[in-house]
Amino acid sequence: MARLGTLLLKGAGALLLAFVVLSVIATLVSIVLSIVATVVAAVVTLAILAVFVLAAVGLASLFWGGDETPVAADDTTDRSSRSTENEDPADRLRSRYVDGTLSEDEFERELDRLLEDDRGRADGLERDRSRTRESTDRTRLWDR
């Protein structure tokens, strides 16, 4: 019977030890989960705060016209000159005609002048290309 008492005492000790170990593990898991929950709550709070700040800035700019940033006169002329430089002369002519700054006769005259200029440039390009072809043909003949 003494053996049975010792065995029961050992069993109870093992159960108590298991209970203590499981309690420590549960405590550690709850600490880690509370840290994760705190971090997630902080991130969500900051995101909501950022949304409110952006909304307030947007409303303030809407009410007080915050979009009116001063632009130097040089910037506007640079932009307009760049856009007209990149624009085709015929397109510029059409836009002037549509705006009403040119009459139909003026538009046709200017368009004819542009087309004649383009033909002259095209002929000049063809002459330049034929010269380069002739020079490359000469160099090939010379190499033989």
Image: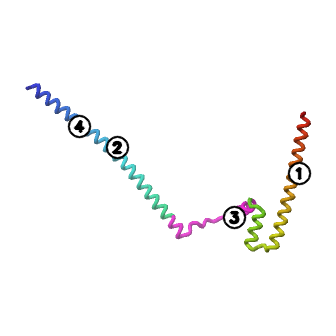
| Amino acid marked by disc 2 | Val
Residue that badge 1 annotates: 127
Q: Is residue 100 above or below residue 11?
A: below
Gap between marks 2 and 1 measured at Cα:
82 Å
Which stretch did the figure color magenta? 58-85
Residue depth check, mark 2 versus mark 1: number of the one nearer the observer: 1
So how many labels did they put on this image?
4
Q: Which of the labelled discs sits on residue 76, or is there none? A: 3
Label 2 element class: helix
Mark 3 or mark 2, which has the lower sequence index?
2
Q: Residue drawn 9% across and 25% down?
A: 2
Residue depth check, mark 3 versus mark 1: number of the one nearer the observer: 1
| Amino acid marked by disc 1 | Arg
Gap between marks 3 and 1 measured at Cα:
40 Å
Label 4 element class: helix
- Horizontal arrangement in the rendering, residue 117 relative to residue 65 (left or right): right
Disc 1 to disc 4: CB gap under 8 Å: no
Disc 2 to disc 1: CB gap under 8 Å: no
| Amino acid marked by disc 4 | Val
Q: Residues within 10 Å of mark 1 (few under 14, many from 20)?
A: few
Q: Is residue 66 above or below residue 135?
A: below
Q: Which of the labelled discs sits on residue 101, or is there none? A: none
Q: Residue drawn 71% across and 63% down?
A: 80
Q: Residues within 10 Å of mark 3 (few under 14, many from 20)?
A: few
